[in-house]
Image: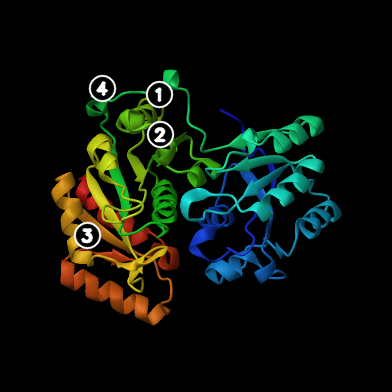
Amino acid sequence: MNTLPEGNAIVYCEDAFNTTNGKTAHGLVRFTQRYKILSVIDSKHAGKDAGMVLDNKENGIPIYASFKDAYESAENSKLKPTHFVIGLAPDGGRLPDSAKDVVKKAIKKGLNVDSGLHDFLSDDKEVKSLANQNGVAIRDIRKVPPRSEMHFFSGKIEEVNSFVIAVLGTDSAIGKRTTAWILVNALREAGYKAEMIGTGQTAWMQGAKYSIILDSLINDFVSGEIEHAVHSAWKNEKPNFIILEGQGSLLNPAYPGGFELMAAGRPDVIILQHAPARKEYDGFPDYTMHPLSKQIKAVEIISGKQVVAITINHENMSPKEVTKVCDEYTKLYDIPTYDVLLSGAEKLVKTILKYKK
């Protein structure tokens, strides 16, 4: 396990920051233990504070129009950049051609490159040769592990006596990971030991100690890898709580996910993340999202566990609308509903503790 943070990072998110295609950058701007984030690259928001653009809260991370501007600013502040991180998360996980030129510029400046996309930079002969010439590392986070290192489901999950919470969602790119981290940190602040099971490239980039990259795994080993991550977190850390980061959603046509986490992770309870103002599945306007009532029912039938809280993604909603929706959902579904990004997770922690007892 590397000592964290590993270095100072410039995050590339051209033309995608504050959109669903920039969710990796969003995660890193909000929270990461793996790097110190120096800046974000996105010409649309150049000159602004990344925290203000994303959450209306300043966090001191500037946005620049180009790699040249970001690199020179870091040099002038005497914070030498060490990493160039791809913060894009487009549909299909493909790297835009324009981004490859910027990657080359970063390599020539001696920056290590981390990418969570399906286009592997380390397989690109030109990029790999350039990296070798400049003595830098390329990490393709989504590269499939050797089969000899993967695990098949064994049933050892039944030994785990930590309270396991799965944070699932009604769509992809809806805030499951952000809610999971907020809950982990809130539980720790409340005096409990809590561990996050990261299931995507962004959680790994944020420094989740127990991580798998779910959408890169060979299907036969998905359940076993989930089980192994949960069991390892329990065995090594003995936490009170283990939080499982969800992927996709049960009913999403392009990114169906969640079943494996429920089947192999054996959660005790479910938290369901939802965006009330979102009408179609992310990236697929011809596919209307299934009603929240149906999504709750599907999760509970498949898992045999209870959805104990609904958490809100407040995209395209005012604070007043969020409060109204939380009250409405709480009454309509008899499930407490919170926006933890706006209001924190103190109330959610109290809800969870009722079920743990």
Q: The residue under label 2 is which amino acid type?
A: Leu
Residue 275 visible at all = no
Which labelled disc corresponds to residue 150?
A: 1
Which residue bears the numbered disc 3?
A: 295
Q: How far apart, in angstroms, are the residues tagged by discs 1 and 2?
A: 9 Å
Quarter in which the N terminus is drawn: top right
Between label 4 and label 1, give the one nearer the viewer: 1
Residue ID at (81%, 42%): 108
Which labelled disc corresponds to residue 217?
A: 2
What is the count of numbered marks? 4
Work out whether residue 61 or residue 294 is closer to the camera in this orientation and state it.
294
Disc 2 or 3, which lies upstream in sequence? 2
Residue 283 visible at all = yes
Q: How far apart, in angstroms, are the residues tagged by discs 4 and 1?
A: 12 Å
Under tag 2, what secondary structure? loop
Residue ID at (22%, 56%): 308
Please identify the residue farthest to the right as the structure is shown: 76
Q: The residue under label 3 is which amino acid type?
A: Gln
Disc 3 or 4, which lies upstream in sequence? 4
Q: How far apart, in angstroms, are the residues tagged by discs 2 and 4?
A: 17 Å
Q: Please provide percent x and percent y for residue 25.
A: 57, 55
Q: The residue under label 1 is which amino acid type?
A: Met
Under tag 4, what secondary structure? loop
Q: Are marks 2 and 4 in contact (CB under 8 Å)?
A: no
Which labelled disc corresponds to residue 1?
A: none
Which residue bears the numbered disc 4?
A: 154
Q: How far apart, in angstroms, are the residues tagged by discs 2 and 3?
A: 25 Å
